[in-house]
Image (cartoon, rainbow, N blue to C red):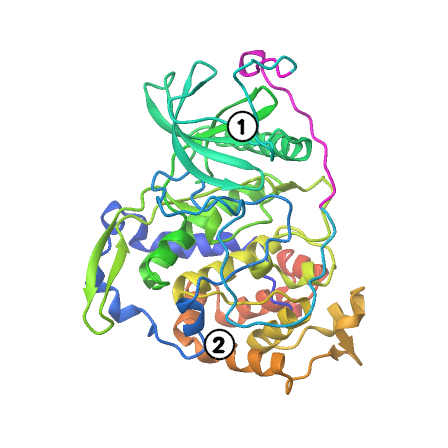
């Protein structure tokens, strides 16, 4: 029963979510009072440790997303020293070394910048300097391309920095400018992202499908620069700054609709995002109201408008391109990726499921950094790994006699047993919410979720669901 929901199900999800009134402008504002009746209790035994600590995730990739990617709400307390995404401290500590994943193979694409968008990177002006790591040295008030006036730093990643700028050719509008390090591998990754963003702009010029909009790009003395619409906090950052208080069911429903709409658009255009996660879902406006919780003796925030955009297409892959063995940030990685069975667009849908769980309960569904433990968590939550997948995978080291090689009596086994509960049993309301996404019966949805091979999924799409049932 492989927990892989085929991307075609997004159409069913959108149909039902669209039938709700969540898209009506009057429903974009949520008061705190109407949240309590439709949200599960926040204080759960096995989730509390995640909310107390700023827990970490491993990236398993070369480049990352800064904490306030394209954000207008940059926090002055943000620590720029690390050069990575925000990290959550583990609620558990283990001995042992981490395995380094294979570096993502470089892909090539056609790349045709217009002459008006380029500057001569071969001749560097005397005033243009880089630091030791390859970042462009710039400060507030500097102007790039006689157009972009730097206001402040929004965030920093291994790829470079994102700056808030005034675009003097757009009537003084504030935009986000992503400035890539003057390092060839990051410049090549930026070219790939530009190629994807240009395709998105071509297919969706009016930005109706909720993917972040690229305004312009140029080469500034060896630094690839991309300008975007200025967005607000990521859905993760808002969750974190709100003490991991979950979003209400109505807010989750609206965000789910938008994410599915964006991902459906990508899949229809033969693209897989491959790195969907709460950090890459940004609010258009993260203004909020504050309510004081007397029982917990703390202020609690409620975002006013749940309109979101999907960002970070640096790892997006076209169907015809080389598919790297490992994709996705660990906690949102599909089982077929872990088992190296090959992946396609359904891996995005798995990530969406993990994201919605995190929105709804306030903590990560799969809080781990180890493949074997990750598989054990999946089994604990969703049932045994399908025998078909076990037979096909090259990762036989994780299995013994057709079953996951896992000691439930070990310290790791106890951790999984205590912190992971069967989804259908422990989270009935969330499970019902998932079913309400679709206009098909629960049994048919269950069937599609747990089809354990691409052939079976294809048969279902071709009308073979009766035979499969």
At 36% across and 53% down in the image, what residue appears? 238
Of residues 143 and 32, the one nearer the viewer is 143
Q: Is residue 223 above or below residue 92?
A: above
Residue 112 is inside the magenta segment: yes
Q: Main secondary structure of the magenta part?
A: loop
Please say whether residue 438 is visible from this viewpoint: no
At 37% across and 22% down in the image, what residue appears? 141
Is the residue under label 1 in contact with that under label 2 (CB below 8 Å)?
no
Q: Name the residue under label 1.
A: 136
Q: Mark 2 points at which residue?
A: 424
For residue 331, side relative to residue 430 (left or right): right
Of residues 20 and 377, the one nearer the viewer is 377
Range of magenta residues: 104-121
For residue 254, side relative to residue 279 (left or right): left
Q: In this view, does 365 lie above or below 148?
A: below
At 55% across and 57% down in the image, what residue appears? 351
Q: Where is residue 358 in the image (x, y as percent from the top left)?
A: 44, 63
**Within 10 Å of the Cα at label 2, are there few (<14), some (14-19), or many (20+) other Cα atoms?**
few
- Residue 165: name its quadrant: top left
Of residues 205 and 245, the one nearer the viewer is 245
């Amino acid at each position: 029963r492989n927990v892989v929901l085929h991307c075609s199900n997004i159409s069913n999800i959108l149909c039902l979510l669209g039938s709700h009134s969540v898209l009506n402008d009057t429903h974009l504002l949520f008061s705190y009072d109407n949240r309590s009746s439709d949200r599960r209790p926040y204080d759960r035994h096995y989730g509390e440790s995640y909310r107390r600590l700023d827990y970490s995730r491993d990236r398993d990739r070369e480049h990352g997303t800064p904490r306030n990617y394209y954000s207008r709400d940059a926090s002055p307390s943000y620590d720029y020293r690390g050069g990575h995404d925000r990290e959550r401290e583990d609620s558990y500590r283990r001995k042992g070394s981490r395995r380094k994943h294979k570096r993502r193979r470089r892909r090539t694409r056609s790349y045709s910048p217009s002459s008006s968008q380029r500057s001569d990177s071969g001749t560097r002006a005397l005033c243009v300097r880089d630091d030791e790591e390859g970042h462009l040295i710039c400060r507030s008030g500097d102007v790039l391309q006689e157009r972009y006036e730097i206001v402040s730093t929004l965030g920093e990643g291994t790829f470079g920095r994102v700056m808030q700028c005034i675009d003097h050719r757009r009537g003084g509008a504030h935009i986000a400018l992503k400035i890539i390090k003057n390092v060839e591998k990051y410049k090549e990754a930026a070219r790939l992202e530009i190629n994807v963003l240009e395709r998105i702009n071509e297919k969706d010029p009016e930005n109706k499908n909720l993917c972040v909009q690229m305004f312009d790009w140029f080469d500034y003395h060896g630094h690839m620069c991309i300008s975007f619409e200025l967005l607000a906090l990521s859905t993760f950052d808002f969750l974190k700054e709100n003490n991991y208080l979950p979003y209400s069911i109505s807010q989750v429903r609206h965000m789910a609709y938008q994410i599915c709409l964006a991902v459906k658009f990508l899949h229809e255009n033969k693209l897989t995002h491959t790195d969907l996660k709460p950090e890459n879902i940004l609010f258009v406006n993260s203004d909020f109201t504050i309510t004081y919780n007397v029982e917990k003796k703390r202020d609690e925030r409620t975002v006013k408008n749940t309109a979101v955009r999907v960002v970070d297409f640096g790892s997006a892959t076209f169907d015809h391109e080389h598919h790297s063995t490992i994709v996705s940030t660990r906690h949102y990685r599909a089982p077929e990726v872990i088992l190296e069975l090959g992946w396609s667009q359904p891996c995005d849908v798995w990530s969406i499921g993990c994201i919605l769980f995190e929105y709804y309960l306030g903590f990560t569904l799969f809080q781990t950094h180890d493949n074997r433990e990750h598989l054990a968590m999946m089994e604990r939550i969703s049932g045994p790994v399908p025998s078909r997948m076990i037979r096909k995978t090259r990762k036989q080291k994780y299995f013994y006699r057709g079953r996951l090689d896992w000691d439930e009596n070990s310290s790791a086994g106890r951790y999984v047993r205590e912190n992971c509960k069967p989804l259908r049993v422990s989270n009935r309301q969330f499970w019902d919410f998932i079913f309400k996404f679709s206009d098909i019966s629960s049994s048919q949805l269950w069937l599609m979720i747990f089809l354990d091979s691409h052939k079976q999924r294809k048969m279902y799409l071709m009308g073979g669901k009766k035979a499969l049932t």
